[in-house]
Amino acid sequence: MKFLMTAAAAAVLVLAAPGAYAGATFDAVKAKGFVQCGVNGSVAGFSAPDSQGVWKGIDVDLCKAIAITMFGDASKLKYTPTTAQQRFTALQSGEVDVLVRNTTQTLTRDASLGLIGAGVNYYDGQGFMVKKSLGVKSAKELNGATVCVQPGTTTELNLADYFRANKMEFRPVVIEKLDEVVGAYAAGRCDVYTTDVSGLAATRATQLGNPDEHVILPEVISKEPLGPMVRQGDDQWLVVVRWALNAMIEAEELGVTSKNVDEMLKSDNPNIKRLLGVTPGMGKHLGVDEKWAYNIIKQVGNYGESFERNVGKESPLKLDRGVNALWTNGGLMYAWPVR
């Protein structure tokens, strides 16, 4: 009996030990030497190549953070653009290692696709954009409108729910590819374009001839917590993706930036010392280098730096932080403790 109890206790310790959980994707990524990141590829501020072919965006920065966690190098990364309908299949099939594609975390997606959300890197909501010449001031004035929307999205469901709830009718113009949706709206094939407000802002700022000719209506009709997804049952990889994101948020909370991170290595703050690897242990728990978070901050920056550069006041989108501000500033961004 004593032997059995000792064996059982040992088994518990083995199961609780760092790295004891499944690591199929973690091991595969290590073996091939890069992270394959599923992205949108067409939404400015989130993931799109610039005129020189350099990928930029808040989702791109998170892809880089994941690669840096694994390899200490943001270049150990490849991008796979996916459509709204293709994205989950790409992740399920193993075509991509992680999906960072302005994807809403929902119960159905978390519970029925064999996938799981790994955090939220942008809190959004669905809105409507119309040409200013229509004279529409509110979504409540859209009865009978034609609406451009992408299939296979929460947007499509929310649209139907909103019009039904408000006893209005609409005619959908359903187009899969984003560029074609925008083109249809610009050409007048639909009165309204609906998607996440951030996507509307990106389209207005970068894809339409004169942004001032288009207005985003004030109604926000849904909650769209956007974030990375991985396959279920691959816990070690889930933890890596989750903590790459948390490290960026925690760094902003602690005032650690890409510009002062080297100076912060000398800080007496125990939270900063753990985050930057001065006090070892966090990297070991993840199965990566102790400088994983330091490298993320040095090469990419903290969450606030990424936000401002890609979608905030320093970007063409010029979005306010709003609910994406830190919790200490009235927002929803709240990092799990690095300890």
Image: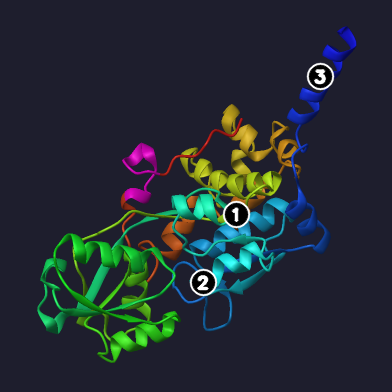
293 to 268, vertically: above or below: below
Whether 329 is among the magenta residues is: yes
Q: Which residue is mark 1?
A: 114
In terms of depth relative to the viewer, which is nearer, 74 or 232? 232
Q: Please tell me whether residue 131 belongs to the stretch shown in magenta.
A: no
**First reached walking from the N terminus: tag 1 or tag 2:** 2
Neighbourhood count class around disc 3 (C-alpha, 10 Å): few under 14, some 14–19, many 20 upward: few
Callout 1 secondary element: loop
1 or 3: tag closer to the N-terminus? 3
Name the residue type under label 2: Asn
Q: Residues within 10 Å of mark 1 (few under 14, many from 20)?
A: some
243 on left or right of 205: right
Q: Quadrant of residue 89?
A: bottom right
The residue nearer to you, when weighing 40 against 10, is: 10
Q: Which residues are magenta?
A: 323-332
Residue 41 in the image, given as x and y percentages of width and height: 52, 75
Q: Amino acid at mark 1?
A: Gly
Circle on res. 210 = none
Residue named by callout 3 = 8
- The kind of residue on which mark 3 rests is Ala
Q: Residue at x 44, y 80 (%)?
A: 176
Q: Which residue is mark 2?
A: 40
Separation of disc 1 and disc 3 at Cα? 31 Å
- Percent position (x, y) of residue 80? 62, 73
Q: Residue 320: horizontal and vertical position, in percent? A: 31, 57
Residue 69 at x, y percent in the picture: 68, 51
Give the quadrant of residue 185. bottom left
